[in-house]
Amino acid sequence: MTATLTRRTPFGELEPIERRMRRLFNIGLAPLTMPLADVYETPSELVVELEVPGFDEKQLGIEVSDHTLTITGERKLTTEETERSFLLQERLESAFTRRFVLPSETDTGHVKAAFSNGVLEVHVPKLATTAPQKIEITTSD
């Protein structure tokens, strides 16, 4: 009899509701302090997509350490922006840090990133899995 393990997250059904509530409360009340992210899995890799409008690739940093992916961004405010008196400011702050814990089956030595139209995509390949092998048992007589 074989037991099948499936990846399940507690309260997984509540995640879309939580995301909608976070967006609802951030509209008009306070600026977002972190860029929004989507994380999904394909058969061969884990992909993190981060919305970073207003940043360019030179202002972004990606680091992987001990299966933790850290994405940072920092942009300098122009003199014009610092002298303004905002009535509403919803754009991202000038700096952010996002951290994502990567599963142990990912290959953190071969992470790749692409940036296009204000979206940063980070691709983390999965480690190749080996097929189980039969081990012959011998007697020590």
Image (cartoon, rainbow, N blue to C red):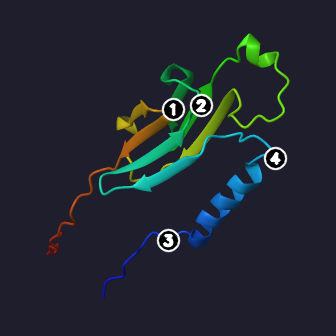
Q: Could you tell me how far apart the alpha carbons at marks 3 and 1 are, in whole angstroms?
A: 27 Å
Q: Nearer the viewer, mark 2 or mark 4?
A: 4
Residue at 52 percent of width and 23 percent of height: 56
Residue at 51 percent of width and 50 percent of height: 38
- Seen in the picture, residue 104 relative to 87 is either above or below; the reply is below
* Badge 3 density bin: few <14, some 14–19, many ≥20, Cα 10 Å: few
Identify the mark at residue 137; answer none if there is no mark: none
Q: Amino acid at mark 2?
A: Thr
Which percent across, then down, holds residue 70? 56, 37
Which percent across, then down, holds residue 12? 57, 69
Q: Nearer the viewer, mark 2 or mark 1?
A: 2
Q: Amino acid at mark 4?
A: Leu
Residue tagged by mark 1?
A: 63
Q: Could you tell me how far apart the alpha carbons at marks 4 and 1 are, in whole angstroms?
A: 32 Å
Q: Quadrant of residue 108?
A: top left
Q: Amino acid at mark 3?
A: Arg
- Seen in the picture, residue 83 relative to 29 is either above or below; the reply is above
